[in-house]
Image (tube, rainbow, N blue to C red):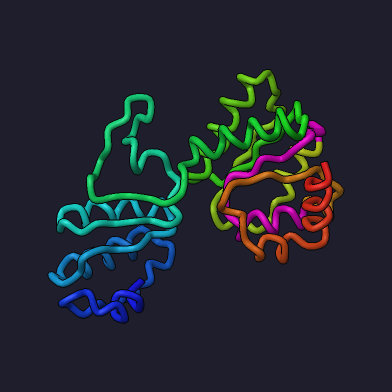
Amino acid sequence: AVRLAKESGQFQVAFQMVALDDSSTPAIGEAAARQLAAEPQVIGVVGTYNSGVAALVKPVLNEAGIVMISPGNTDPTLTLGPNPAVPVRPHSNYFRLVVPDSIQGSVLAEHAFNTLGVREVALVSENKPVSLALVDAFETRFVALVGTVVSEQQFAVGTSDFSGVIAAVQGVHPDLIVFGGEFASAGPFRNQATTAGLTVPLMGSDGIKAAAYITRGGAGSERRLRSMRLR
């Protein structure tokens, strides 16, 4: 967009893109936002990727009158406020290009029940709000469709050994695992689950839509991906 603006010759100002790394860490993102807010020539911010970072960044940018457009935030509260049942937009400067987890979770539940014919699921999620919002929305819609949640498991962000979660899920024999989290944890979980003999399909949101999920998930993820497509 910056290149096209420069080449068009329609503008009297020179556009320049500046990239700051928030390291997917809220405090670092907030510091970067304050740096940008102190620069009077900044007209807008594209970011952040993580919802947790956005929660601290957007009020800083809002106070400075800087528009923020995220390509990746999915936490419903960022646009609906702390109680989505009574929506109140917290900051008028904030926009996003992806649907929130409240919608993603509901659509995934309908696809699982109506298209895949799934009736029993296990919910596995990172214990951060944005991931839990996804599985909560899935559960609400899936149960309303008369589906059954046979297990609900949480793990801490940064977990690398999923053996306890996998054992708990294996014991209830679900038709499908619904995963709340991103490819960095979903890939290793898929790999370890397959190795342990837990080969049922895994479903997730945009957070696992990455080639790295297939790579980290191993051969089991590729087999499952093909089998889901064939149904």
Image quarter in which the C terminus is found: top right
* In magenta stretch: residue 80: no
The residue depicted at 50 percent of the width and 36 percent of the height is 103
- Residue 221 lies in what quarter of the image? bottom right
Q: What stretch is highlighted in magenta?
A: 171-192
Where is 172 relative to 4, above or below?
above
Where is 39 relative to 206, above or below?
below
Q: Nearer the viewer, residue 153 or 29?
A: 29
The residue depicted at 27 percent of the width and 37 percent of the height is 89
- Residue 19 lies in what quarter of the image? bottom left
Number of numbered callouts drawn: 0
Q: Which of 211 and 218 is in front in this view?
A: 211
Q: Residue furthest right?
A: 197
Kindly tell me whether residue 185 is visible in this rendering: yes
Kindly tell me whether residue 16 is visible in this rendering: no
97 to the left or right of 163: left
The residue depicted at 30 percent of the width and 53 percent of the height is 56
120 to the left or right of 103: right
- Residue 68 lies in what quarter of the image? bottom left
Image quarter in which the N terminus is found: bottom left
Image location of residue 167, percent across then percent down: 77, 42
Where is 114 relative to 15, above or below?
above
230 to the left or right of 92: right
Q: Which of 5 and 148 is in front in this view?
A: 5
* In magenta stretch: residue 176: yes
Q: Which of 71 and 154 is in front in this view?
A: 71
64 to the left or right of 199: left
The residue depicted at 42 percent of the width and 67 percent of the height is 23
Image location of residue 155, percent across then percent down: 60, 46
Image location of residue 161, percent across then percent down: 69, 56
Image location of residue 193, percent across then percent down: 78, 50
